[in-house]
Image (tube, rainbow, N blue to C red):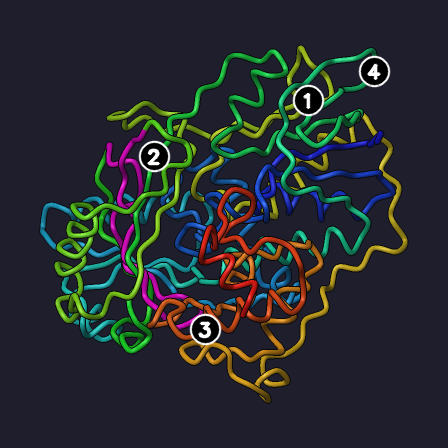
């Protein structure tokens, strides 16, 4: 159980680091406390590749954002993850906001973002006929993709290239030995020369286990509403409001998804719980009201689902102070690399963050190339899978696709793990039709308890469970 590097955290950044390091002859381990990867912020966001226009020039956040976004087309091709450039509009609705658009244009130009331009009202209407606004800043290079599919693909490709991945494994203690670290978990102990703390909203707590007390994360919840695919043609680009200082995010925006839905959100609310993923009536109503200001054509009947994510913020509630990514090898604890406060645009920056961490590790470990490294993940095309029994009518998912999701390389077999891999249950009826069919398939392929999202979330108990056994 001795490794060169242990990465703690199975979000998109942790899995990108694992994949990047698998290019070299290293003994690598990735640990995550959840039953699957992408269970935190990496699977609960807008799925946007940001250009960096809203990040202060010269910051580490800006540098990694811009470098990472440039790597996305190649990365997504290698991993078989759908990706599409749609552009982003930051829309002014009042004359008082026009100066902010000009300021943001200047910020983007300073950062080296070339494809930016200001649009007047007729130009805005030509691009987005249904959007209300008097002007906009247009960033043509921004793209959309499936964030959880990228996270899963990074993990699968890392494992394909030799990375050991242990899920359902929570770190409970870190001890510095003479020339390595010992990590105690609820699933055994492991040692390594390097530890990479990519624990997201728990990064400050993990650092404290190692004796590093200078960080504090302030959890900030963002709620989203999901529109039916029937609304897909209402917008062509991402549509953002002019950001408000101290809000805690980029404002409630409209984002087309790679799968055809439109997302409304996120809100920004500081909360005590680091995994408080509730969606609330008042906030969901607020999302609707604010979205109507930009897109009057939407109707309450168009909503099919809601979800929430938690941002890992380093600034206190109410503060408008900019906080940069904290990525460093701790000077007083050689071999311990902290990544703290990796909130938006952490997803866009993930490929560049991985290379940045690789350079930090190269200062202490000799990185010999792995001759067997394969950057490509084998993915069956959707067309090949569309013959056979339909299990999910809304998303047109076949039995073959569900079986592939059940038998995934990471061994994650909960209902949510299956949903995230093949989208069964994500459509208009939210699993009303496909859920019993997927349950039957799980019973056919495994004797394990059927859970919604891993241990402690049993789908059937008591008389219902006994009835299921007899059927």
CA distance for labels 3 and 1 = 45 Å
- On screen, residue 98 versus residue 330, left or right, reads left
Question: Badge 1 is on which residue?
Answer: 336
The quadrant holding residue 160 is: bottom right
Question: Badge 4 is on which residue?
Answer: 179
Callout in the foreground (4, 3)? 3
Q: Residues within 10 Å of mark 2 (few under 14, many from 20)?
A: many
| Rendered view: 438 above or below 37 | below
CA distance for labels 1 and 2 = 26 Å
Callout in the foreground (1, 2)? 2
The quadrant holding residue 247 is: top left
CA distance for labels 2 and 3 = 33 Å
Residue 89 in view (yes/no): no
* Mark 3 vs 1, N-terminal side: 1
- On screen, residue 289 versus residue 436, left or right, reads left
What span is in magenta? Answer: 246-271
Disc on res. 220: 2
* Mark 4 vs 1, N-terminal side: 4
Q: Which residue is drawn at 70% across and 39% down?
A: 30
Q: In x, y percent, where is residue 383? A: 59, 85
Question: Badge 3 is on which residue?
Answer: 434
Pick the front one: 24 or 271: 271
Quadrant into which the C terminus falls: bottom right
Q: In x, y percent, where is residue 161? A: 80, 53
């Amino acid at each position: 159980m001795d490794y060169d590097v242990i990465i703690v955290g199975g979000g998109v950044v942790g899995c990108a680091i694992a994949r990047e390091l698998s290019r070299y002859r290293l003994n690598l381990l990735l640990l995550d406390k959840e039953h699957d990867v992408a269970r935190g912020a990496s699977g609960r966001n807008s799925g946007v590749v940001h250009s960096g226009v809203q990040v202060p020039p010269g910051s580490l956040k800006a540098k990694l954002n811009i470098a990472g976004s440039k790597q996305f087309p190649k990365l997504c091709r290698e991993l078989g993850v759908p990706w599409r450039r749609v552009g982003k509009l930051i829309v002014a609705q009042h004359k008082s906001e026009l100066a902010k658009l000009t300021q943001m244009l200047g910020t983007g130009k300073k950062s080296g973002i070339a494809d930016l331009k200001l649009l007047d009202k007729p130009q805005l209407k030509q691009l987005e006929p249904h959007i209300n606004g008097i002007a906009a800043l247009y960033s043509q290079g921004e793209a959309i993709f499936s964030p959880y599919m990228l996270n899963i693909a990074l993990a699968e490709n890392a494992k394909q290239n030799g990375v050991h991945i242990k899920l359902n494994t929570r770190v409970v203690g870190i001890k510095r030995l003479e020339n390595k670290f010992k990590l105690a978990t609820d699933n055994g102990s492991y040692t390594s020369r390097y530890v990479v703390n990519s624990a997201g909203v728990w990064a400050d707590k993990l650092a404290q286990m190692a004796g590093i007390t200078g960080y504090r994360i302030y959890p900030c919840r963002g709620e989203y509403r999901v529109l039916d695919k029937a609304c897909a043609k209402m917008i062509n680009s991402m549509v953002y409001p002019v950001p408000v200082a101290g809000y805690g995010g980029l404002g409630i925006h409209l984002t087309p998804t790679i799968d055809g839905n439109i997302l409304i959100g996120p809100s920004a609310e500081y909360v005590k719980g680091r995994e408080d993923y509730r969606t609330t009536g008042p906030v969901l109503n607020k999302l609707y009201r604010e979205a109507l200001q930009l897109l009057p054509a939407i109707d309450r009947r168009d909503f099919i689902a809601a979800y929430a994510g938690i941002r890992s913020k380093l600034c206190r509630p109410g503060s408008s102070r900019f906080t940069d990514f904290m990525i460093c090898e701790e000077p007083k604890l050689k071999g311990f690399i902290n990544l703290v406060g990796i909130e938006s645009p952490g997803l866009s920056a993930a490929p560049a963050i991985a290379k940045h961490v690789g350079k930090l590790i190269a200062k202490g470990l000799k990185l010999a190339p792995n001759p067997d490294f394969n950057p490509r993940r084998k993915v069956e095309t959707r067309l090949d899978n569309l013959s056979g029994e339909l299990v999910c009518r809304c998303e047109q998912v076949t039995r073959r696709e569900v079986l592939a999701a059940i038998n995934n390389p990471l061994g994650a077999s909960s209902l949510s793990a299956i949903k995230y891999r093949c989208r069964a249950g994500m459509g208009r009826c939210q699993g009303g039709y496909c859920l019993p069919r997927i349950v039957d398939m799980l019973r056919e392929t495994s004797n394990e308890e059927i859970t919604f999202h891993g241990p402690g979330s049993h789908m059937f108990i008591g008389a219902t469970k006994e009835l299921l056994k007899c059927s």
